[in-house]
Image (cartoon, rainbow, N blue to C red):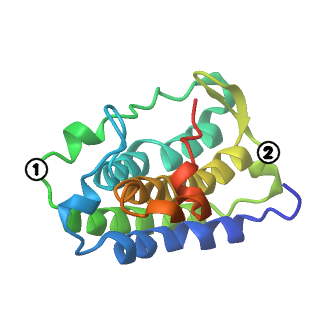
Amino acid sequence: MDGWTLDGTIALLERTPATLAALLGGLPDEWTRAREGPETFSPYDVVGHLIHGEKTDWMVRARIILEHGEARSFDRYDRFAQSRDSAGKPLAALLTEFAARRRDNLMALRGLNLGPAELERRGTHPVLGVVTLRQLLATWAAHDLTHLHQIARVMAFQVREEVGPWVRFLGVMRCQGHSD
C-alpha cells in the first residue's frame, strides 16, 4: 500500500475497542447475539473472536517472525475458539477484556521499535506461505475493519424485513460476507 505506516496502523487499531464499546455497549441481546444464519458470528461472537486474536495471533505471530523468521510456521488459528472462551461471559466483560488486551498488545508493538528492515522480515503462515511482518500488521488493521463491517451487516440483517422499500438504498442490506 502506498503510504502505509506503522503509526497509522496503530492509530486505527487503537480505535477499535472504543468503537465496539460505543456501538455494542448496553444494547439488548436481540442486537448483540443475533446472527445471519447457522455457523455465522453474532456481534458478541466477533468480540470474543477479536479477544482470541489478541491472545494468540497478531503479537504472537509478530514475535515468531522476529525470532524465527521462516524457520517456524505460525500455529493454526482457531476461528471458533470464542465459543469456548467467551461462554457465559457478559458482553460488557468481553469489551473490557478486549480493550485491555489490545492496549497491552499495542504497547508491546510500540516497544519493538520496528524499523523498515524488521517490517520486511518474513515468516511462514500455515496456509498462505511466506508473509512479511508489514503484511501481518496491515492485516491486523484490515481484520478489525472487516469485523466492524461484519457487525454492521449482522445488525442490519435484523431489520431487513422492517425497512420495506428503503432496502434498495441500504447497501448493507445487500452485502454478503467477504471471506473464503
Image quarter in which the N terminus is found: bottom right
Which tag is nearer the camera, tag 1 or tag 2? 1
Q: Dots 1 and 2: beta carbons under 8 Å?
A: no
At x 38%, y 31%, the residue is 78
User: Mark 1 — residue?
Assistant: 88
State the residue in front, 161 or 173: 161
Percent x, y of residue 178: 59, 40
State the residue in front, 90 or 102: 90
- Dot placed on the residue nearer the N-terminal end, 1 or 2: 1
Crowding at label 2, few (<14), some or many (≥20) Cα neighbours within 10 Å? some
Q: Is residue 36 above or below residue 72?
A: below
Residue farthest to the right?
A: 2
Q: Is residue 62 left or right of residue 20?
A: right
Image quarter in which the C terminus is found: top right
Label 2's element? loop
Percent x, y of residue 125: 61, 28
Q: Is residue 142 left or right of residue 19?
A: right
At x 55%, y 42%, the residue is 176
Q: Is residue 160 above or below residue 163?
A: above
Percent x, y of residue 106: 51, 65
Label 1's element? loop
Crowding at label 1, few (<14), some or many (≥20) Cα neighbours within 10 Å? few
State the residue in front, 179 or 16: 179
User: Mark 2 — residue?
Assistant: 120
Q: Amino acid at mark 2?
A: Glu
Q: Is residue 89 left or right of residue 175?
A: left
At x 75%, y 41%, the residue is 121
Image quarter for residue 126?
top right
Image quarter for residue 4?
bottom right
Q: Amino acid at mark 1?
A: Gly
| 3D distance between C-alphas at marks 1 and 2 | 41 Å
At x 19%, y 67%, the residue is 28
